[in-house]
Image (tube, rainbow, N blue to C red):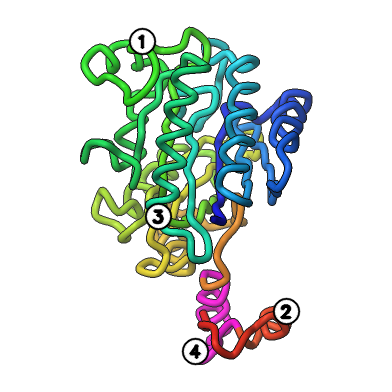
Amino acid sequence: MLVQCVPNFSEGRDPERLSRLQAAAQATANVRILGFEGDADHHRSVMTLAGDGEAVLDAVFRTAAVAVAMIDLREHRGVHPRMGAVDVIPFVPLANTPMEYAVDLARRLGERIGRELAVPVYLYEFAATRPERRNLADVRRGGYAALQARMARDAPDFGPGTPHFTAGAVAVGARRPLIAFNVYLNTQDPTIADRVARAVRGSSGGLVGVKALGMDTVTQGQVQVSMNLVDYPKTSLPAAVEMVRREAARFGASVTRTELVGFLPVSAAVDSLRYYLQLSDFDSSRILEMALAYEPSGPRE
């Protein structure tokens, strides 16, 4: 059963700590680390693992244990919302793996983290045990600072009923693939990034399946609109970027560059080629490496 897992850690600045997290994941056989990226402004890192589900579960638990042992959220300062040292752990089914299997992995990992690491666990998305916990933003609302009061009225799915003293809590879930994508604007005014993000964000009347936040990325000398495209077949990457561009122009700002966090499906890359090169009939079989690997009986993107 092939799965992807994309744990996010509240550490993006210390190379030694990042190396320890990577080493913990590498200690499990039959798991590939496809990518590991840290961001100093967000003070956050994103690791992408893939492999057999049982092996991935073991690798993620080992890495979470290292994060809990060395990251103290009381000292953490970063622009990205967070509630835990290991903040979010989503399992994503790949190939023919059913979502039910990813849900089972999420729930088993959550139980183990709660029991062995004494960190409260909230299940989200397809693994959620309550409808109001499907949306990650709702689960994480208020962040680490609000955990004590939140947990007094909203008990976690696993683990203790109070936050871990230094590691907070963690959201563990199962979801479909998403695209994490950042757009930088040529302004240092964070209110512009906030207004653009609000216009683009689906929950405030923007684009379907788009989550967006304005980020004050101080070391870049400019602000950022940070997006998650959770339903990219309905809202393509070009559609999201172009709306950011149009909304930014209303405030006299423009896009300077963009940034992909982690990976994106080939269909999303094909959508971008179709849009920006106006190749309306383009499909993935026209990409050389895809054509070499393509089996006539299989689907095309």
Task: Please report the residue visible at 48 percent of the width from the left and 33 percent of the height from the top.
Answer: 109
Q: In whole angstroms, how far apart are the C-alphas of marks 2 and 3? A: 28 Å
Q: CA distance from mark 3 to mark 1?
A: 30 Å
The residue where tag 3 is placed is 99
Q: Secondary structure at mark 4?
A: loop
Residue 158, percent from left and from top? 37, 23
Q: Are marks 2 and 1 in contact (CB under 8 Å)?
A: no
Pointer 2 or 3: first along the chain:
3
Which residue type carries mark 2?
Glu
Element carrying mark 1: loop
Residue 154 against residue 45 in the figure, above or below:
above
Give the magenta range: 268-284
36 to 165, vertically: above or below: below
N-term-proximal mark, 2 vs 1: 1
User: Tag 3, which secondary structure?
Assistant: helix
Snapshot quadrant of residue 25: top right
Q: Which residue is mark 1?
A: 162
The three-letter code of the residue at mark 1 reads Thr
Q: Secondary structure at mark 2?
A: helix
Q: Identify which residue is drawn at 46% across, 41% down.
A: 105
Question: At 55% across and 78% down in the image, what residue appears?
Answer: 276
Left or right of 17, for residue 162:
left
Q: Position of residue 286 (x, y in %)?
A: 64, 87
Of the two numbered discs 3 and 1 in the rendering, the one whose residue sits closer to the viewer: 3
